[in-house]
Amino acid sequence: MTELFTAESIISLLTLTFLEIVLGIDNIIFISIAANKLAREDQARARNIGLILAMGFRLLLLMGISFVISLSKPFTHIDSGWFRAELTGQSLILFAGGLFLLYKATSEIHHKLEGPGEDEVTGQTTGKTTISSVVAQIAITNIVFSIDSILTAIGLTQNVTIMMIAVVLSVLVMMFFAGPVGRFVNEHPTIQMLGLAFLIMIGFMLVVEGAHLSEVIIFNQPIGTVPKGYLYFAIAFSLLVEFLNIRLRKTQKPVQLRGYEGQPLRDGMI
């Protein structure tokens, strides 16, 4: 325990906590948008369950850190002339997770703009979402984000206790801000669209990163990687522009997106 109170350990803890919060931004975006489809009284519960799952996945992975490290080792090799790759568990998870985010974000954009309204036969609203389905989506996404987060943490420190404390602190901070973020997303349809666009960017980055970690070479062209700094700069710049637009157009009524039952959102509520 005395090692936790050294200057080096405290700096590592603060740095890692900040990094976990930054890496968790995409997780908060997905959780907020997924919970957005629920009734207003269920959204906070879904967000908290999602973040608790995120913390649980990370702590379990830290306790099985040797398993996580083994995921970065190739388990098979493919060489078909024009296509070569050394597949790893980590790369396959990132690749599949990226495809899932691309599919989910695109589906959400369609739902919010052109999704189901009233059933033509019964006259009933369609597309109602349950907490269990939202939690299942969050759980699938958390697996991807958790592995990426833990592998990044391992690169900063080898002290598992520090990593666990950083994970708990970062999730507590995210739980505190998840509510305001969710309400803000509800009240501003353009933020919802930006958030979904960010998820498409993140999904693409995960697909490319998965291919890069597998050392994929197509027609003698190796697949590179997308620096996360570029991605976060694009997200921050887009949000800054939108915040300025919101301040300049306070009196303008926003467009209405479809809510959790296929009905338009009104007055920031669903």
Image: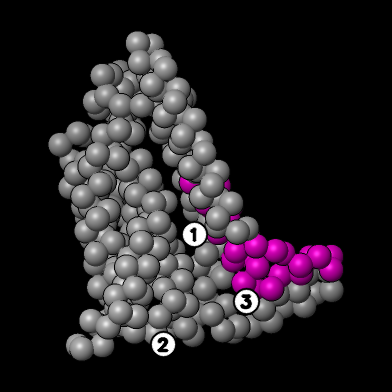
Q: Residue at x 24, y 25 (%)?
A: 269
Please state which of residues 41 and 168 is positioned toward the viewer in this rendering. Answer: 168
Q: Which residue is drawn at 26% across and 60% down?
A: 171
- Could you tell me if the residues under marks 2 and 1 are in contact, i.e. CB atoms within 8 Å? no
Q: Name the residue under label 1.
A: 97
Q: Is residue 141 visible?
A: no
The amino acid on which the numbered mark 2 sits, given as a three-letter code, is Ser
Residue 214 belongs to the span the image colors magenta: yes
The quarter holding residue 188 reads top left
Question: Callout 3: 10 Å neighbours few (<14), some, many (20+)?
Answer: many
Quarter containing the N terminus: bottom left
The amino acid on which the numbered mark 1 sits, given as a three-letter code, is Gly
Q: How many labels does the image show?
A: 3
Mark 2 vs mark 1: in front? 2
Above or below 190: residue 195: below
Which dot marks residue 66?
2
Please state which of residues 152 and 109 is positioned toward the viewer in this rendering. Answer: 152
Residue 30 belongs to the span the image colors magenta: no
Residue 102 point in image, percent of width and height: 53, 48
Mark 3 vs mark 2: in front? 2
State how far apart marks 2 and 1 are (Cα): 22 Å
Quarter containing the C terminus: top left
- Could you tell me if the residues under marks 3 and 2 are in contact, i.e. CB atoms within 8 Å? no
Which dot marks residue 87?
3
Task: Please state the extent of the stretch shown in magenta in the rendering.
Answer: 199-225
State how far apart marks 1 and 3 are (Cα): 15 Å
